[in-house]
Image: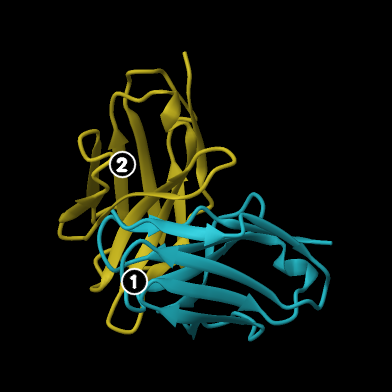
Amino acid sequence: QLQLEESGPGLVKPSETLSLTCTVSGFSITTNDYYWGWIRQPPGKGLEWIGAIYYSGKTYYNPSLESRATMSVDTSKNQFSLNLNSVTAADTAVYYCARYYDTIEFDAFDTWGQGTMVTVSS
Amino acid sequence: DIQMTQSPSSLSASVGDRVTVTCQASQDIENSLNWYQQKPGKAPKVLIYGASNLQTGVPSRFSGRGSGTDFSLTISSLQPEDVATYYCQQYDDLPLTFGGGTKVEIK
């Protein structure tokens, strides 16, 4: 059964780097047509797409975060990761990892992790 | 970026009511639109893809329509388990963008 699970520190100090990993189980991260993405949701607010990565390593970022975000993939561990540097309180949010299925017929986030709350505070 | 505007931001309706949420794109996105349901404390779940296609396992009381810039999600008979926030999301162009959400409650 496919599962995605986010892991990483729940508290990050301002100006430091937020690092999260998403472990995928029950499905190979190298399957064609599937991208692996990060979405965040500040408390009480809406959803913001951070970026996505293909198993080949090709990345796509939201321009609003591109200068601070770096995504990577580790196919041997079936994991992908997000680093967000120079964080501020505005980066406090629930961070979700999700699978994005991209075909002619279907183009959506079809499976999500449960989300992990990251607070930026000294 | 393509801006997605949802209305209303919240609504309250009775069980059995027909409920419609709208989403407007800032430019023509053809039918490149998905709808997600997010229950309190949970991750979003896709309900409708490609503007009008029901995701497997989603009750048939949910439907979507629209193309171009104007889209809608309808719940034909609101049920207590439909209490959630609903988001539209466009995939016509990067960055992927979401609407601000519509919170649906039971009156």
Which residue is rendered at x = 27% and y = 47% of the image? A62
Please give the label number shown on residue A82.
2
Q: Nearer the viewer, residue A92 or B26?
A: B26
Dot 1 amino acid type: Tyr
The residue singled out by tag 1 in the image is A101
Query: Please, is residue B95 above or below residue A85 in the view?
Result: below
The image shows residue A83 at horizontal and vertical percentages of 29, 36
Dot 2 amino acid type: Leu
Crowd around label 2: few <14 · some 14–19 · many ≥20 (10 Å): many
Tell me the quarter of the picture where residue A43 sits. Answer: top right
The image shows residue B82 at horizontal and vertical percentages of 71, 68
Disc 2 secondary structure class = strand
For the question of whether residue A20 can be seen, the reply is yes
Q: Nearer the viewer, residue A8 or A63?
A: A63
- Label 1 to label 2, Cα distance in Å? 19 Å
Which residue is rendered at x = 52% and y = 60% of the image? B6
Which residue is rendered at x = 53% and y = 74% of the image? B72
For the residues beneath circles 1 and 2, the answer to whether they share a chain is yes
In the rendered image of the structure, the colour used to display chain B is: cyan
Crowd around label 1: few <14 · some 14–19 · many ≥20 (10 Å): some
Query: Please, is residue A17 above or below residue B91 in the view?
Result: above
